[in-house]
Image (cartoon, coloured by chain):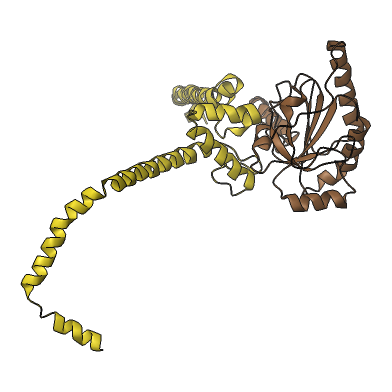
Chain colours: A yellow, B brown
């Protein structure tokens, strides 16, 4: 209570005093900042490394989402909480940090687990035929069939439908 | 006309049904390993379970696979929480001892486990004749494309993966594989005497 009362009493201090105090702080600040230059540089470096870390994290996350968890059913190592998936994410991160490209990291996992480890199969060989070309060919075939059938119906219609 | 329609429908349905039928015969959990025929990944890991003489290695030693070049190496990944590992343990232990003095090395690699329960497990199982190393960050396991335990890899004298066994391995299969690799190694270089002890590198 007495403290509060003291504070209200002190609030009546001359405004000039307060202004002088603020001014001195303001003028002192640049010298303080200059004096701390090395530490701000260090902070900048730290900020850079944090940014680099978050970039690395983002790259790790993106790549991990493309790799299959070996002990799960159809989910990526990014989604899996399993211990092996966690270690595999650590391997991804280590290799990216070491300067390997995402494709090189994928190649590493493919050399260990086979192409099975990639959630999205690569477009070559049998994959290319079965997975990427076959649907397109089937679609085209279906469209051709549809065109053929519809044309036959429409041309046959005038002569045959009345007879029915 | 209906029989023609049925024929066309059957013609389209047959390959689809065939594909599904073929799919039913496959184990969705089976992952074909690209490792057999390739050079086995090497590792250098610390021994935590020494095994028994004459094939023991002191705990704390580092077993380096690269140092076993010229020998047949059986690498068995196991864990104390793994039930199937119990089935193969006696076979592995006995077979390892049978090859003592020959250019054959057995190494157990602990997978996703702690040393205390692993040592307890070994005691519970009546001991392990060959040394086991710990793989705390699973790097060796991932290098070997592991997706479960037990898995056993048999490396030939050139360090290539000659066989990968998923699930428990029997003494019969193990002996057959190691014997045939010994014969192959003997045929390829009869003059060279294979080193009998692995290396110790801190």
Looking at the picture, does residue A50 appear above or below residue B65?
below
Residue in the image at 44% along x and 41% along y: A58
Looking at the picture, does residue A118 appear above or below residue B156?
below
Relative horizontal placement of residue B33, taking residue B163 as reference (left or right)? left
Q: What percent of the width, then of the height, locates residue A94?
A: 53, 36
Residue in the image at 37% along x and 42% along y: A51
Q: What percent of the width, then of the height, locates residue A78?
A: 54, 43
Residue in the image at 86% along x and 51% along y: B123
Residue A71 in view in this figure: yes
Relative horizontal placement of residue B60, taking residue A25 as reference (left or right)? right
Residue B9 in view in this figure: no
Q: What percent of the width, then of the height, locates residue A46?
A: 37, 45
Rendered image quadrant of residue B4: top right
Q: What percent of the width, then of the height, locates residue A144?
A: 49, 22
Relative horizontal placement of residue A11, taking residue B13 as reference (left or right)? left
Name the quadrant of the C terminus of chain B.
Answer: top right
Q: Which of A24 and B143 is in front in this view?
A: A24
Name the quadrant of the N terminus of chain B.
Answer: top right
Q: How many marks?
A: 0
Q: Nearer the viewer, residue B7 or B170?
A: B170
Q: Nearer the viewer, residue B42 or B7?
A: B42
Relative horizontal placement of residue A142, taking residue A17 as reference (left or right)? right
Which residue is farthest bottom? Answer: A1
């Amino acid at each position: 209570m007495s403290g509060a009362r003291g504070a209200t009493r002190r609030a009546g201090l001359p405004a000039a005093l307060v202004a002088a105090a603020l001014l001195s702080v303001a003028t002192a600040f640049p010298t303080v900042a200059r004096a701390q230059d090395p530490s701000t540089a260090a902070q900048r470096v730290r900020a850079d490394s944090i940014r680099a870390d978050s970039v690395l994290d983002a790259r790790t996350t993106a790549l991990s989402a493309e790799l299959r968890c070996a002990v799960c059913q159809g989910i990526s190592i990014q989604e899996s909480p399993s211990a092996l998936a966690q270690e595999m994410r650590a391997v991804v991160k280590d290799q990216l940090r070491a300067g390997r490209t995402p494709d090189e990291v994928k190649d590493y996992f493919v050399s260990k687990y086979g192409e099975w480890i990639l959630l999205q199969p690569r477009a070559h060989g049998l994959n290319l035929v079965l997975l990427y070309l076959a649907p397109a060919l089937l679609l085209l075939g279906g469209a051709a069939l549809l065109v053929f059938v519809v044309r036959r119906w429409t041309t046959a219609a005038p002569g045959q439908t009345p007879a029915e | 006309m209906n029989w023609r329609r049925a024929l066309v429908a059957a013609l389209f349905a047959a390959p689809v049904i065939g594909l599904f039928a073929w799919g039913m015969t496959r184990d969705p959990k089976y992952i074909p390993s690209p490792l057999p025929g390739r050079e086995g990944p090497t590792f250098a890991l610390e021994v935590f379970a020494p095994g028994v003489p004459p094939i023991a290695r002191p705990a704390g030693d580092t077993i380096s696979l690269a140092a076993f070049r010229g020998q047949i190496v059986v690498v068995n990944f196991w864990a104390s929480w793994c039930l199937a590992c119990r089935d193969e343990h006696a076979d592995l232990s006995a077979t390892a001892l049978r090859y003592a003095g020959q250019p054959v090395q057995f190494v157990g690699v602990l997978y996703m486990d702690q040393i205390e329960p692993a040592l307890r497990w070994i005691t519970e199982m009546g001991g392990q004749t060959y040394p086991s190393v710990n793989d705390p960050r699973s790097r060796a396991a991932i290098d070997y494309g592991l997706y479960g335990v037990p898995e056993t890899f048999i490396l030939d004298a050139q360090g290539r993966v000659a066989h990968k066994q998923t699930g428990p391995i029997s003494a019969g299969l193990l002996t057959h594989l190691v014997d045939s690799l010994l014969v192959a190694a003997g045929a390829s270089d009869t003059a060279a005497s294979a080193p009998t002890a692995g290396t110790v590198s801190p």
